[in-house]
Amino acid sequence: MALLVQRKPLSWLEKTYLPQILGGMRITLKHLFAPKVTLQYPEERPVLPENYRGVPTLVKDPNGREKCVSCQLCEFVCPPKAIRIWPGEIPENAETAHVEKAPDDFEIDMLRCIYCGLCQEVCPEEAIFLQDIFSVTGYSRDEFKFRKNKLYELGGTLPDKHYKWDKKKEAAFRGNEH
Amino acid sequence: MDFTSFLIILAQALAVVVVLMTFCAYAVLAERKVSAWIQGRVGPNRTTLPVIGSIPVIGTFLTRLGIFQPVADGLKFLFKEDVTPAHVNRPYYILAPALALVPALVTVTVVPFGQYITEAGEMVPLVLADLDIGILFILAVSSLGVYGIVLAGWASNSKYPFLGGIRATAQMISYELAMGLSLLPVFMWINAPGTDAALNLTAVVQGQQGWWLVLWQPLSAFIFLVALFAETNRLPFDMPEAETELVGGFHTEYSSFKFGLFFVAEYAHIVIGSAVFTVLFLGGWHPLPGVPLQLEGILGAISSVGIFTTKVALLVFLFIWVRWTLPRFRYDQVMRMGWKVLLPLAIGNLIFYALAIAAFDSLK
Ligand code: SF4
Ligand code: SF4
């Protein structure tokens, strides 16, 4: 429904602009002395809300096992195709040989990433997380392609609720009963 | 004139120009700081100098206040790349920035900024040239400043600067009239029968030993102030620049030092304008209405200059304050206000004071 707003005609005093100008100057004068809101950035840091979506990183579980199994779902889902994965095999003699796969190399191009968080959402292993790093700098485009080492370095270790692969190993040890 | 007195005059002139330029530089800083404070920010607070900046409390305080910022700003203007577009009209393009700044520096010669009372009780004004036609000189020379802007707009040979130049011309003509007319009552007032003040600015200040003229003639002062805002191209009248409409207006095609000259010229005009307003309406170096400054000797001279600069600084603050309060008027509004409001008002004001002064004289 159309809404008609009745405009009051300006009074003579208002047409001289002067009361409004003085009123405006009073307001700006108040702001002149009001406390400032600037955050002195490099020294002071903003308080980030929980679930903030910063740079995507790879994480390890508390046992130090790299969680990514290079299923490549994140590579597939990533809208701007920022992720590139070179899948690799875990050697027979390793303790986690039953996991079978881990990335040989993993690359996220931070210039392409749009911080959508889809990779974190799609990952079946809870291996990739968007954490609280928001300032990424570099001198060349190549510096923005974060490789596996860097991604693990940034990601660190996050607590794990499931220890899925440990349980799997135990189950296999007990003969995979249900 | 022998050589030493020539040297003394040269030194005085240099001193005045140096002080004026410092004033301009710090007016820029004040603009940045005040705008920041009004918008809830803190403004420039990082630039520092090696030794002074590392003095514990004072150094940090000065840095936070941005005291060293003008140095960095100036250096930046010197060292940035100076681009001269291929399509400009070169000689005029290069001439324009200088033409904008020079009139501002020339007008300062006739503005009295203090007094020195000798032991004999004689008043010597502190001014580079105490002309009898002071105000005429100021009006004539300061309006030359617009040629810099117009020439820049025209020589840039591109559409936005051109529009800026046109606007500057129109605005100048419209407001110069009201400005001149608003000054006539002041000089009628000063030139009471029996005095020979002529158009001398020192005489105007001496005429305000009692009440200031802003109290006697508030309307003249108001019209002059509005016209001053328009003449200095300050918001709400910054038609020639209008960065939201005309990119940068007349200085769109300028960079580096040439742009710096325009920038300084704008502030020089503001400082000079404030100084002229102080002389004409705010009692010059007299501390309060009704309280003339009568200190003798060097102390008196220093305090007169101090009082004068304080008043100018407060007026510059007013300029900045208004700029960060008001939006820009539309072009047609500016024209309408100039021709349909300020001009009739100034004429009415002139007639009123002419009659009032005549009536007052015949009563005596
Ligand atoms: S956050 Fe989005 S854009 Fe960035 S890597 Fe993950 S899926 Fe790709
Ligand atoms: S990060 Fe997750 S989704 Fe991406 S390859 Fe590794 S396990 Fe798969």
Image (cartoon, coloured by chain):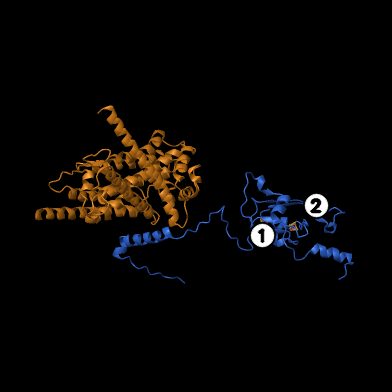
Chain colours: A blue, B orange
Q: Work out whether residue A81 or residue B292 is closer to the camera in this orientation and state it.
A: B292
The chain ID associated with circle 2 is A
The residue beneath circle 2 is A88
CB at disc 1 and ligand 1 closer than 8 Å: yes
| Amino acid type assigned to the residue bearing label 2 in the image | Gly
**Residue A27 x, y percent position in the rendering:** 39, 61
Image point 37% across, 59% down: which residue? Answer: A25
Q: What crowding class fits label 1: few (fewer than 14 Cα within 10 Å), some (14-19), or many (20 or more)?
A: some
Q: Work out whether residue B57 or residue B90 is closer to the camera in this orientation and state it.
A: B57
State the quadrant of the C terminus of chain A: bottom right
The residue beneath circle 1 is A117
In this view, which residue lies farthest toward the bottom?
A1
**Residue B332 x, y percent position in the rendering:** 34, 53
Q: Quadrant of ligand 1?
A: bottom right
Local secondary structure at mark 2:
strand
Local secondary structure at mark 1:
loop
